[in-house]
């Protein structure tokens, strides 16, 4: 973990300021190490730093944010399920598009263009070959990963 990440956690209130040694180095306690592990685990399932800061602020003040944590996790699950459904829809659209393109390619000689990319244009006369804009945005995000 980089020093910049630790400093960010400190600025957001996720980590208490560490004790400084005589030479100015930060000295983190075992509790801070455990807190970093907690933060990283929560981030891995979709919690944001700001959400964690709010939760940990309540917890540090002696409160019990358990129901809020549960509510946020349920929200993360709903968002994930929505994304999965969108990706399944995009997969189905892409399969249909490829099937259509395969049909076009069967009737196109190897030295002739089938103009597959032009099927994406808004002027396409066939609805099935014009995919929604979110298809391209989601596909681009997946390709970048």
Image (cartoon, rainbow, N blue to C red):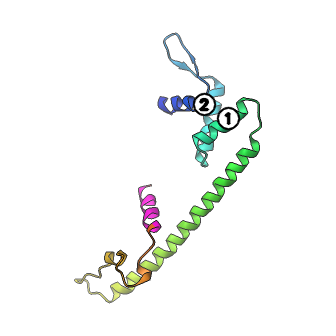
Give the magenta-colored segment's residue range.
134-144
Query: Residue 42 at what x, y percent from top left?
Result: 63, 43
Q: Earlier in the sequence, mark 2 or mark 1?
A: 2
Identify the residue at image location x=51%, y=75%: 92
Based on the displayed image, in which of its 4 quarters is residue 111 positioned? bottom left
Q: How many marks?
A: 2
Q: Nearer the viewer, residue 18 or 1?
A: 18
Q: Is residue 124 visible?
A: yes
Mark 1 lies on residue: 56
Q: Is residue 20 above or below residue 72?
A: above
Identify the residue at image location x=34%, y=87%: 106
Q: Is residue 58 above or below residue 112?
A: above
At numbered mark 2, what does the secondary structure look like: helix, strand or loop?
Answer: loop
Identify the residue at image location x=47%, y=63%: 138
Assign the magenta stretch its main secondary structure: helix
Q: Is residue 99 visible?
A: no
Identify the residue at image location x=55%, y=67%: 86
Mark 2 lies on residue: 13
At numbered mark 1, what does the secondary structure look like: helix, strand or loop?
Answer: helix
Query: Residue 82 at what x, y percent from top left?
Result: 60, 63
Query: Residue 116 at what x, y percent from top left?
Result: 33, 78
Q: Nearer the viewer, residue 101 or 53?
A: 53
The answer to if 97 sits in the magenta stretch is no
Q: Residue furthest bottom?
A: 107
Q: Which mark identifies residue 22? A: none
Of the 4 image quadrants, the one containing the C terminus is bottom left
Q: Nearer the viewer, residue 142 or 123?
A: 123
Q: Nearer the viewer, residue 66 or 143?
A: 66
Residues marked 2 and 1 touching at CB (< 8 Å): yes
């Amino acid at each position: 973990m980089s020093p910049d990440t630790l400093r960010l956690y400190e600025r957001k209130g996720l980590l208490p300021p560490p004790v400084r040694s005589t030479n100015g180095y930060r000295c983190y306690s075992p509790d801070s190490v455990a807190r970093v592990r907690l933060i990283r685990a929560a981030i891995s399932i979709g919690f944001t730093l700001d959400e964690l800061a709010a939760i940990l602020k309540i917890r540090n003040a002696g409160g019990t944010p358990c129901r809020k944590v549960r509510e946020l996790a349920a929200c993360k699950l709903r968002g994930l399920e929505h994304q999965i459904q969108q990706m399944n829809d995009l997969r189905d659209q892409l399969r249909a598009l490829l099937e259509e393109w395969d049909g076009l390619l069967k009737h196109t000689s190897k030295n002739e263009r089938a103009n597959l990319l032009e099927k994406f244009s808004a002027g396409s006369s066939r609805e099935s070959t014009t995919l929604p804009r979110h298809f391209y945005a989601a596909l681009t995000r997946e390709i970048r990963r």
